[in-house]
Amino acid sequence: MKMLRVPLLMIGLLLCSQGFAATAQQNKMTTCNADATAKSLKGDERKTFMSTCLKAAPAANDAKVLTPQQEKMKTCNADAKTKALTGDARKTFMSDCLKKK
């Protein structure tokens, strides 16, 4: 009986934790839904508005901000691409580049 408690507890914690994670798409859906309600849209008009709203690009403040490590990787990757490096030469270049900056 004690052997069964731990797996059941883990499954319960896993299921509970998924309810707290809201994705960007869920947040966008909530915002678009609130906007459609505020505009009192109904029927086909609401469907069209929701479709357009959900397809729209995220606002500038919603854009993903890169970490310093990601910025380094992006810069080094671009440099390796302009130098047309491949294989071991690229690996060596990327390693040295990421260590320098």
Image (tube, rainbow, N blue to C red):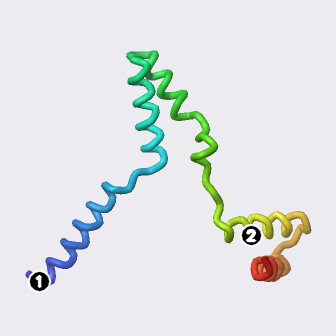
Disc number for residue 2: 1
Q: Is 42 rendered above or below residue 50? A: above
Residue 86 in percent (x, y) is at: 84, 73
Helix, strand or loop under label 1: helix
- Mark 2 neighbour density, 10 Å: few (under 14) some (14–19) many (20 or more): some
Q: Give the left or right position of residue 86, taking residue 32 as reference.
A: right
Residue depicted at x 39% and y 16%: 43
- Quarter of the image with the N terminus in it: bottom left
Q: Name the residue under label 2.
A: 72
- The residue type indicated by label 1 comes to Lys
Residue 97 in percent (x, y) is at: 81, 77
The quarter of the picture where residue 66 lies is bottom right
Residue 5 in percent (x, y) is at: 15, 77
The quarter of the picture where residue 9 lies is bottom left
Please name whichever residue, 54 or 59, is drawn nearer the observer in this view of the structure. Answer: 59
Residue 34 in percent (x, y) is at: 40, 30
Q: Give the left or right position of residue 64, taking residue 26 as reference.
A: right
- The residue type indicated by label 2 comes to Lys
Which mark is first along the chain, 2 or 1? 1
Residue depicted at x 21% and y 75%: 7
Q: Is 11 rendered above or below residue 60? A: below
Mark nearest the camera among 1 and 2 is 2
